[in-house]
């Protein structure tokens, strides 16, 4: 099992919180209140609560759940969510598997509202980006999404800067705080864009894959379990799929129809023996094909061939 990349942060979980981090970003003052890795033992519950500031919750490993306002969401590694000012939320680790959380809790103050400084003290580009980010934070949806732009490693970069105390480490820590905010906003933007992408009708898609697989393998010893395994689905799921999208027919009937259609083509277009045609189409023997063919069409394969190969319409298949 790979090592937990944030393990070193357990050495001193409150290390970053010991710093008095005030970050000036455009027109904003960002005051870092909490900045740490915390551990939720299996089954741990933090009851409903809220904060006056923004709190970012990232899940680097483990499982649990969160209730944001009145909606419950499952949590797993790679997800994060934001509880903005005055948003009620409840957290709980899985009853069996513990959960870790990287937490950033910040207060954001708009200095321009205080009119204590002229507008020209801000870098125009930086201020525009800061303002766009903060405005989006105010409207981010209240549900978890994937950490698509890797904000979590910023926590580790900040901790390493504190621990190594190299030249520029304090600036590095502040830059990582801003990166967490920016990457969180981008993750929700990306998630929103992905929701607009065209999606497949998964039932129709799986049905088509199943039929393609049957058509490609009907001549061999193919079973319903083979099809289910190929599509990584359960046998019952495949059965329901066929009944819903193939006129209520079972797998065995679908397979038999495809094999009989192949037999009819061979009888109409070749001079192969019935025995050989039966084997080519996946029937165990000519005698068995004879029985099935007579039951379905009211004549033997030989009779079908003798009658000019025109008296019986071959079965139509979707492909």
Image (spheres, helix red, strand yellow):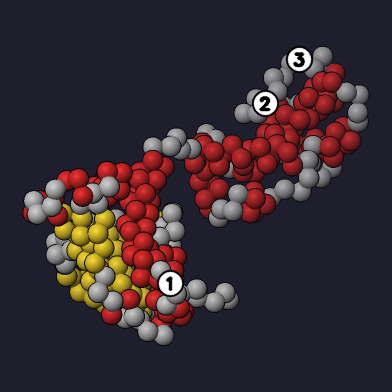
Does 312 sit left or right of 61 as displayed?
A: right
Comparing 99 with 188, the one in front is 188
Q: Is residue 313 above or below residue 289?
A: above
Residue 155 can be seen in this image: no
Q: Where is residue 78 in the image (x, y as percent from the top left)?
A: 43, 62
- The quadrant holding residue 149 is bottom left
Q: Label 2: state its secondary structure.
A: loop
Determine whether the residue tagged by mark 3 lies in a helix, strand or loop. Answer: loop
Q: Position of residue 35 (x, y in %)?
A: 31, 72
Which residue bears the numbered disc 3? Answer: 310
The residue singled out by tag 1 in the image is 167
Mark nearer the N terminus (3 vs 1): 1
Residue 126: x and y, percent?
A: 30, 48
Q: Which mark is residue 35?
A: none
User: Regarding mark 1 in the picture, which secondary structure is present there?
Assistant: loop
Considering depth in this image, is 252 or 63 the residue closer to the camera? 63
Asked which quadrant contains residue 13, the reply is bottom left
Q: In this view, does 122 lie to the left or right of 52?
A: right
Categorize mark 1 by other alpha carbons within 10 Å: few (<14), some (14-19), many (20+). Answer: few
Residue carrying label 2: 315
- Residue situated in front as seen by the camera: 101 or 305: 101
Please identify, in this view, whether the residue under mark 3 or under mark 1 is nearer the observer.
1
């Amino acid at each position: 099992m790979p090592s937990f990349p944030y393990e070193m942060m357990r050495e001193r979980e409150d290390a970053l919180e010991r710093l008095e981090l005030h970050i000036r970003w455009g027109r904003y003052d960002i005051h870092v209140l909490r900045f740490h890795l915390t551990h939720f033992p299996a089954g741990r519950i933090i009851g409903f609560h809220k904060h006056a500031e923004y709190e970012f919750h990232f899940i680097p490993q483990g499982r649990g759940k969160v209730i944001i306002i009145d909606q419950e969401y499952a949590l797993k590694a790679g997800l994060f969510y934001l509880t903005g000012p005055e948003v009620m939320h409840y957290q709980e680790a899985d009853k069996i598997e513990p959960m870790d959380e990287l937490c950033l809790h910040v207060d954001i103050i708009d200095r321009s509202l205080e009119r204590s400084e002229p507008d020209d003290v801000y870098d125009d580009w930086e201020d525009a980006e800061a303002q766009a980010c903060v405005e989006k934070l105010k409207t981010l949806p209240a549900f978890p999404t994937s950490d698509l732009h890797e904000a979590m490693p910023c926590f580790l970069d900040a901790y390493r800067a504190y621990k190594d105390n190299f030249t520029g480490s304090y600036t590095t820590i502040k830059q990582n705080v801003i990166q967490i905010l920016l990457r969180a906003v981008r993750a929700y933007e990306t998630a929103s864009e992905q929701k607009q992408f065209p999606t497949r009708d998964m039932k129709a898609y799986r049905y088509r894959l199943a039929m393609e697989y049957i058509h490609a393998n009907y001549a061999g010893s193919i079973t319903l379990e083979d099809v289910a395994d190929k599509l990584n689905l359960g046998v019952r799921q495949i059965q329901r799929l066929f009944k819903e999208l193939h006129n209520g027919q079972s797998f065995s009937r679908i397979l038999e129809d495809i094999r009989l259609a192949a037999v009819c083509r061979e009888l109409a277009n070749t001079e192969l023996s019935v025995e050989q045609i039966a084997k080519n189409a996946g029937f165990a023997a000519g005698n068995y094909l004879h029985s099935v063919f007579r039951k379905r069409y009211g004549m033997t394969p030989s009779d079908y061939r003798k009658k000019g190969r025109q008296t019986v319409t071959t079965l139509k298949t979707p492909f």
